[in-house]
Amino acid sequence: MTGNSARVQAVQNITNRIPMPAKTPESLSNLWASDVFTLSKMKESLPKDVFKSVKKTIEAGAELDVSIADVVALAMKDWALSKGALYYAHVFYPLTNATAEKHDSFISVQSDGSVISEFSGKVLVQGEPDGSSFPNGGIRSTFEARGYTAWDVTSPAYIMTTDNGATLCIPTVFVSWTGEALDKKTPLLRANAAMNKAAQRVLSLLGHTDIAPVNSSCGAEQEYFLVDANFVNNRPDLLLAGRTLFGASAAKGQQFDDHYFGAIPERIQVYMQDAEEQLYRLGIPAKTRHNEVAPGQFEIAPFFEAANVATDHQQLLMTVLKNTAKKHGLVCLLHEKPFKGINGSGKHVNWSVGNASQGNLLDPGTTPHSNTQFLLFCGAVIRGVHKYGPLLRAVIATASNDHRLGANEAPPAIMSVYLGSQLDNVFEQISNGKITGSLNAGVMNLGINTLPVFNKDSGDRNRTSPFAFTGNRFEFRAVGSGQSVAGPLVAMNTMLADSLNWVADTLESNISQGADLDTAILKTLKELIDQHGAVVFGGNGYSAEWHKMAVEERGLANLKTTADALPVLKEAYIEELFDKLGVLSPVELASRFEIYSEQYILAIDVEAKLVVSMAKTGIYPAVVKYLSELSATISSLKSNGIELDNERLVKIAAMLTSMMETVDKLSAAISQHDFSTPEEHMHFCAKSIRPLMDDVRHYADALEGEIADELWPYPTYQEMLFIK
Ligand code: ADP
Ligand code: MG
């Protein structure tokens, strides 16, 4: 329901709302991972040799011994039943950004009609959901609908509790009958493996003999908005598209910078605590929380974990944030740009690689110039971003993220690397052929005796860089808030694998030509930075000069929209990259292009249809009503000898006419379907449909500022952002 009375009712409901009481927090030791089938629970419940075998697979990447599955399944089932679960589900991650699950009961009917609960190794290891309704990008025709899920031992099983009961959830990969990956997890596991293999090569060339498996880590910072559900229910755009397609800015936005890191409102704090409690139960290490820049915007960041587990946890976190919001009468918006004119939401993906024997391979220590191992790994990342920057842009390309990138609130669409002054200087020395030392970050003396003198970080933060080195990791800052982090992690690990292989090849060739190890390393690093240093940029990424310099002088791509970025997935060098490293076959890669371009087109189609219907059925009637009231008043005043200028009436009528003319143009554009390629259709969406939507909005938002507030049908920005 919409309309002004619904709007008034919404405000009343919120004003009269009985606050949800804060729960007394349980102790962390009681909560922590209580709903996870952890290694320690396995240790308690599994025979020693079985436990050892599972542990070896989880920790050292050893091949899964399927013969132990029955024993593990039994222990898992007993644990799940003790937690009240009656169902189990293979959870998988199709090529949408969502999580999918198929629930099965533990119940098994016996020949005598009685029932027992049963869960065999076979069903733990493999499932077969009918996958025909998941996007497959042409990999399967619908009559070949078989899809398989297979247990991912490296991501722990857990219990998901909702008001409807508890379910044992088993993280799985999802592949087609012909073995192609239909999900986001399979390529992530493959990309990790490729990166591990390449990293091992480099480490052994550097003389290490004891090298544990190298894994990537991810810590994702999640931004989100909270809006009262009463408002969302009156906004078809928020309900169906997750963002406002109309809405004049409130007089106050974020210009006072008074929300960022401000005191968290009580209602929100109660919500956050509730969400965190569930995250702790699920073994998700939620660590920081704070108010973000925009009113109504917040952030949560769990501590980093192994990339595969962090990715699954990220999906769960988004689910928990949304479901908990509902319980609190709120809606959690994960869209990248829910409100015009204030900041949107991103998901910074902090990423590093390391292992148990050599530690974090992206940790420079205090004297990076002498840490050649670090320089090689860091250099490999630089080369990766330079060679495959367009790929990094493509994996974050969605209709919603396009609103953020390059809008002076998020990094531009140009992919560059920020290193900080100390590392900039080291790489400059390398380029000059000789490394002499590291600039000292120095100490910060605040000149006040009672305050400590502290060591400065070796580089400042740079908010404008899409890919910034932040001390011991890289932070990919252009990722969208609603996205799975799998795609970015696949791209990063794959480009790193390729670069590390190049490093290993080059080292080998330098050594075979007679160079000693140190000389070979320096030669490799110099070649690397001379070829790829153009991607390193420490200045203001928002500035117009950079946009010009990046493209014209440095040859970097500026792929502004998804329509520009997604076709990168079809380029030969990207196909070769994924194929060569065994991450995605050409068919799998092609399917991703198909699916993501279709999602882009569909997202814009839904929005455009909403613009048309809200303009016609909500805004037009409200403005007409105002015009008729106003003109009746003018006439009646006139008959009483009072002259009210009708200039305003004429002006509003003209704006309304313009709006409806644009709506008609938009309607005509939506009905156009004769496109020969997805590329052509995407460009039509980006260049014709989107601008028409903006034009309609332009008139509508202006009208919102003209007509009587008591007639406006939709909750306003002021209400949605400031009433909680
Ligand atoms: P900031 O807002 O300063 O960027 P936060 O503390 O909000 O920092 O988030 C930083 C994220 O980076 C956290 O998830 C943290 O666990 C993660 N992180 C820290 N070190 C590493 C690392 N070596 N590899 C990957 N992620 C890391
Ligand atoms: Mg950050």
Image (tube, helix red, strand yellow):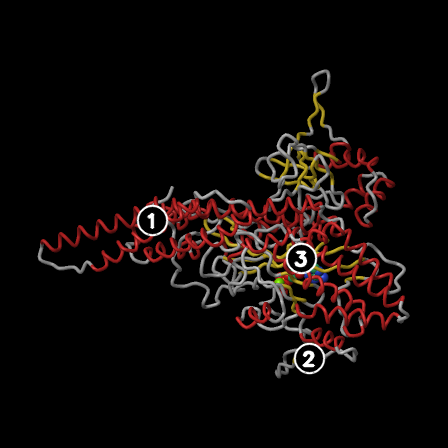
**Amino acid type for the residue under numbered disc 2:** Val
- Disc 3 residue: CB within 8 Å of ligand 1: yes
Q: For the point 72% across and 24% down, which residue is it?
A: 116
Closest to the camera, between mark 2 and mark 1, is 1
327 vs 22, nearest the viewer: 327
Residue receiving disc 2? 443
334 vs 504, nearest the viewer: 504
**Amino acid type for the residue under numbered disc 3:** Gly
In this picture, residue 586 sits left or right of residue 232: right
Residue receiving disc 3? 219
In this picture, residue 107 sits left or right of residue 561: right
Number of other residues with Cα within 10 Å of mark 1, as a class: few under 14, some 14 to 19, many 20 or more: many
Q: Position of residue 490 (x, y in %)?
A: 69, 52
Q: For the point 30% across and 55% down, which residue is it?
A: 655
The label shown at residue 83 is none
For the N terminus, the image quarter is top left
Residue furthest to the top in view is 112
Q: For the point 59% across and 35% down, which residue is it?
A: 133
Q: Are marks 3 and 2 in contact (CB under 8 Å)?
A: no
Count up the numbered dots: 3
Q: Secondary structure at mark 2?
A: strand
Number of other residues with Cα within 10 Å of mark 3, as a class: few under 14, some 14 to 19, many 20 or more: many
Q: Are marks 3 and 1 in contact (CB under 8 Å)?
A: no
Q: Are marks 2 and 1 in contact (CB under 8 Å)?
A: no
Residue receiving disc 1? 619
Closest to the camera, between mark 3 and mark 1, is 1
**Amino acid type for the residue under numbered disc 1:** Ile
Q: Position of residue 86 (x, y in %)?
A: 66, 32
